[in-house]
Amino acid sequence: MEKIIDENKQGESLILQAKSENSRKLYIESYGCQMNFSDSEIVASILEKEGFNTTQNLEDADLVLVNTCSIREKAEQTVRKRLEKYNAVKKINPGMKIGVLGCMAERLKSKFLEEEKMVDMVVGPDAYKDLPNLLTEVDEGRNAVNVILSKDETYGDISPVRLESNGVTAFVSITRGCDNMCTFCVVPFTRGRERSRDPQSIVAEINELWEKGFKEVTLLGQNVDSYLWYGGGLKKDFDKASDMQKATAVNFSQLLELCAMAQPKMRFRFSTSNPQDMTLDVIETMAKYDNICNYIHLPVQSGSNKILKAMNRQHTRQEYFELIESIRKIIPDCAISQDMITGFPTETEEDHQLTLSLMEYVKYDFGFMFAYSERPGTLAERKLEDDVPIDVKKRRLSEIIQLQLEHSLYRTKQHVGKIEEVLIEKPSKKSDAHWSGRNSQNTVVVFPKEDYKVGEFVMVKINDCTSATLIGEAVGYSENN
């Protein structure tokens, strides 16, 4: 997996604050998207009530869980290597139990449990509330499986335990599942159909985070712009809702406004958006509230209409351009990032050049770029031959990455000389004498610590930059403190 900026630590072991009365130890690792990390916080909350504290030491664990990702072949290979590591430790500690959570659960449950005997438990994304029952099965010496997908589970009634938290930023899940059925993607099969969470439970979680000192929330979903609450149930069933339900339904723009108004001094982001579903009212709401960050992650996947159609993306190149133009008009300083897949079946050199020309038009701030890897069970795997040679994929990916690096530097240079609000999140990785935070556009900013503290909003003058980082000096506190 190639990224210009990787905001998420991949394969991070997570810790929750120990409860003294808990006697069992949980070691949990998460891979893949932000939703998986958010789900691990839900799992930790459920298991905390079952007597588990987490540990950083794999060798001490009574239960080891890995929250998995199936979106890329490389992610699956990484998880398999971790399972091999867990089983090596289990030979020394035979009482240890191993479980697989998340997106690999449904597809590989038989292989993990029966053929390779690598795990004791397999749990799908909608079955985490069943963990107490599954643990009982495992403790009694039986393998345990629940990968059933739900039509209404959103975990809205569970207060997540914030794992490995900086105490400043947090994720809040607002939807689960996806209805888009892109031909390359396994998410609709591993996470089920799309359903939204009660907005009042979302606002309540945000208020709780504010009371605990958090300063920024990212609203999460496979496709946040499809958020639609009408009392519960699948989004596809909205047409069957009553007139009252339809009249009082809450869409994503309205949810954003509810959040922004509930905590005016808290910053809000959201991810991920889908071009076909992002509407002007969302962009206008962003412009209306200063505490909604000027940043949109807007996956495009390809610049070729032919390839977009083969991917079952419900937008064209021109429609994407029109959306970009609307964003630039309403929020001129809005940062935009992309997801891009190169080497999709039937992609020609002309298609690749169309992708490069689209990138030239948008000049993304940063991006997440991949060579296509065939995912079992998807329509592309069943219907399309993976006919682009690997060396061609690698060459095209390299060209996309190089162009993105040029555009990232172009965008960061536009910040130099400006004074921007930065939320301090942590010490800089490269210098203990510097803080690291992000501006509204989601760009990393580093500056000397002086007397400032984590969690404070600081005004920073940007003096220099790289393609990924802004370098500056604090000139005072923001009025948001």
Image: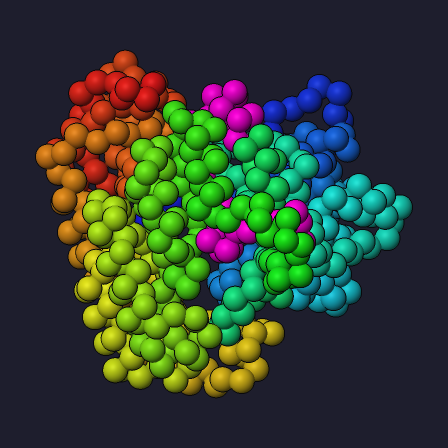
Farthest left residue?
Answer: 417
How far from the left and from the top, in percent, is residue 241? 66, 56
How far from the left and from the top, in percent, is residue 139? 85, 43
Quadrant of image for the N terminus: bottom left
Farthest right residue?
Answer: 140
Left or right position of 129 against 345: right
Q: Is residue 390 above or below residue 101?
A: below
* Residue at the image position 71 percent from the left and 46 percent from the top: 128
Task: In this rendered view, identify the residue nearer to me: 330 or 151.
Answer: 330
Farthest front residue?
Answer: 243
Q: Is residue 113 above or below residue 155?
A: below
Q: Is residue 223 magenta?
A: yes
Quadrant of image for the C terminus: top left
* Residue at the image position 34 percent from the left and 42 percent from the top: 286
* Residue at the image position 25 percent from the left and 48 percent from the top: 330
Per the rendered image, the range of residues in magenta is 205-234
How far from the left and from the top, in percent, is residue 92? 72, 43
* Residue at the image position 58 percent from the left and 30 percent from the top: 204
